[in-house]
Amino acid sequence: MHKTHKPAGSPRQNRRLGWLLLTPALLAFGVSYLLPFAMALVRSFFRGMGGEFAGLENYADLLRNQTFLLALRNLVLLWCFVLPLNLLAGFVAALLCHRAPWQKHRFLFFLPAVLPAAATVSIVYDWLGRFPAEGWLSGRANSPVVGFVFALLVLWKGLGYTVLVLTAALSSIPLEYTQAAQVEGAAFGAILRHIYLPLLRPAFALSALLGVYNAFRCFREALMLGGAHPAESLYSLQHFLQNNFTNMNFARLEAACVLLIAVPALAGGVLLARVMRQRRRRGG
């Protein structure tokens, strides 16, 4: 006897069921993230903790603050250094893992991302000759070398995400594409330029977004390396937020939080819209 299968619901019913199942997560996201952001956005237009309306004064004060500009400069420099190397090294590692006998061991690249911050900092200290924490705060440590070492640490911790994403994307490319190109006499460089790179654009975009996000996740390492007031090349936006919270400068803190959330969200939305537009064009 053949088993009878119940007919699947209509697309509208499936869509309603999907939204119903997604409702608890949306409520949790709204209460945990959207509501505090809305409160911070409203309070950023008032002076201090009082009710005096200040308009954009808090934002103007923030953009004139030298420590905020220092932290912003360090973040941009970190992205300019880490993101290209992350994508390049991740792509090379993904190519080596792709269809290799040891492909399943690609998860070893993800190991640094799950290491505790204390273990990561201990490894860095061992690599640098067991420098004490005071060495990172000394005048000698104010050289760009400290920022360079921290950038290597961020690269090391975030490389696993790129390797996993690009390896999965390479595995999704039909083997017939490369086999047909090889039959036509295409070299590996031509296959790389005309098959792999065009089809991996969404995976590269996702890896870049993860790289931007991972740059914010290494604050614990920076705090353990340099303390609350580290060398200039190690000073981050998280240091700025923590120090302003400690000093109870809530107006500046709220303005900074709004900028740090709104600007990356806007950039991510633009990038996502571009990827979706390209996907619709290919589908059409």
Image (cartoon, helix red, strand yellow):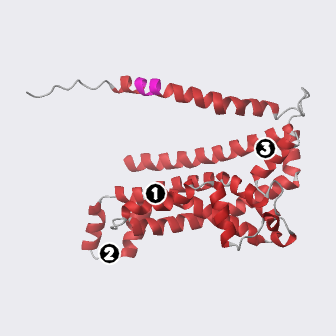
Quarter of the image where one finds residue 144: bottom right
Direction from residue 260 to residue 230 in the image, left or right: right
Residue 51 is labelled as none
Q: Amino acid at mark 3?
A: Ala
Nearer the viewer's eye, disc 3 or disc 1? Answer: 1
Q: In this picture, which residue range is highlighted in magenta?
A: 16-21
Q: Which residue is mark 2?
A: 186
How far is mark 2 from mark 1, CA to CA? 27 Å
The quadrant in which residue 1 appears is top left
Residue at image mark 3: 256
- In this picture, residue 242 sits left or right of residue 181: right
* Secondary structure category for the residue under label 2: loop
Work out whether residue 23 can be spotted: yes
Residue annotated with mark 1: 164
Indicate the secondary structure of the residue bearing disc 3.
helix
Please name the residue shown 79% across and 66% down the image: 136
Circle 2: residue type = Ala
Label 3 to label 1: alpha-carbon separation:
33 Å
Q: Position of residue 50 (x, y in %)?
A: 90, 28
The mark closer to the camera, 2 or 3, is 3
Residue that protrudes farthest toward the left in the picture = 1
For the residue labelled by badge 1, is the local secondary structure a helix, a strand or a loop?
Answer: helix
Local packing at callout 3 (Cα closer than 10 Å; few below 14, some 14-19, many 20+) is many
